[in-house]
Image (spheres, rainbow, N blue to C red):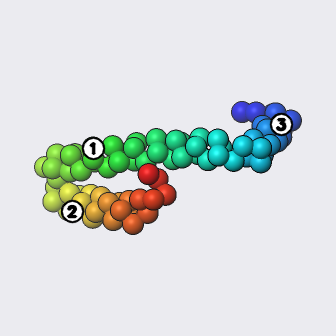
Amino acid sequence: MLSKEDQRRFEQITRNLRESDPAFFARLDNRARGRRGRWLLLLTILLWAALPAATVAFGRLTGAIFAVVLLTNAVLMWRFRQRWL
């Protein structure tokens, strides 16, 4: 954790960077967003792969709930794909 003074300095540096070089700041923001999106996609794929095992281990109802949650996740990822790509 940063102290209040360090946090204030960090925010000031960030604000100055954003104002002085917006193209650089946008590139950094896009890279972080891309990494977050790749991790989210990888997690979704792993959860889809785990669906059959969860169904066998915990029963059909749990598998159905798991599938509905993952399907909702997939729809939301597709709908808002520009935010995290």
Extreme residue in the right direction: 5
Which of the image's four quarters has the N terminus? top right
Marks 1 and 3: in contact by CB < 8 Å? no
Q: Which residue is mark 1?
A: 46
Whole-percent x, y for residue 63 in the image = 20, 57
Which label lies toward us, 1 or 2?
Answer: 1
Instruction: Name the element at disc 2.
Output: helix
Residue lying at 35% horizontally and 62% vertically, measured from the top left: 78
Residue lying at 45% horizontally and 59% vertically, measured from the top left: 82
- Mark earlier in primary sequence (2, 3): 3
Vertical order, 50 against 9 (above or below): below
Q: Amino acid at mark 2?
A: Ala
Whole-percent x, y for residue 73 in the image = 35, 60
Residue lying at 44% horizontally and 51% vertically, measured from the top left: 85
**Horizontally, is 83 left or right of 3 in the view?**
left
Q: Amino acid at mark 1?
A: Leu
**Horizontally, is 32 left or right of 53 in the view?**
right
Q: Which residue is mark 2?
A: 64
Q: CA distance from mark 3 to mark 1?
A: 40 Å
Quadrant of the rendered image containing residue 10: top right
Instruction: Name the element at disc 3.
Output: helix
Vertical order, 2 against 82 (above or below): above
Kindly tell me whether residue 7 is visible in this rendering. no
Residue lying at 49% horizontally and 57% vertically, measured from the top left: 83
Q: Amino acid at mark 3?
A: Arg
Which label lies toward us, 3 or 1?
Answer: 3
Whole-percent x, y for residue 75 in the image = 33, 65
Q: CA distance from mark 2 to mark 3?
A: 50 Å
**Horizontally, is 76 left or right of 11 in the view?**
left
Q: Which mark is residue 85?
A: none
- Mark earlier in primary sequence (1, 2): 1
Q: CA distance from mark 1 to mark 2?
A: 17 Å
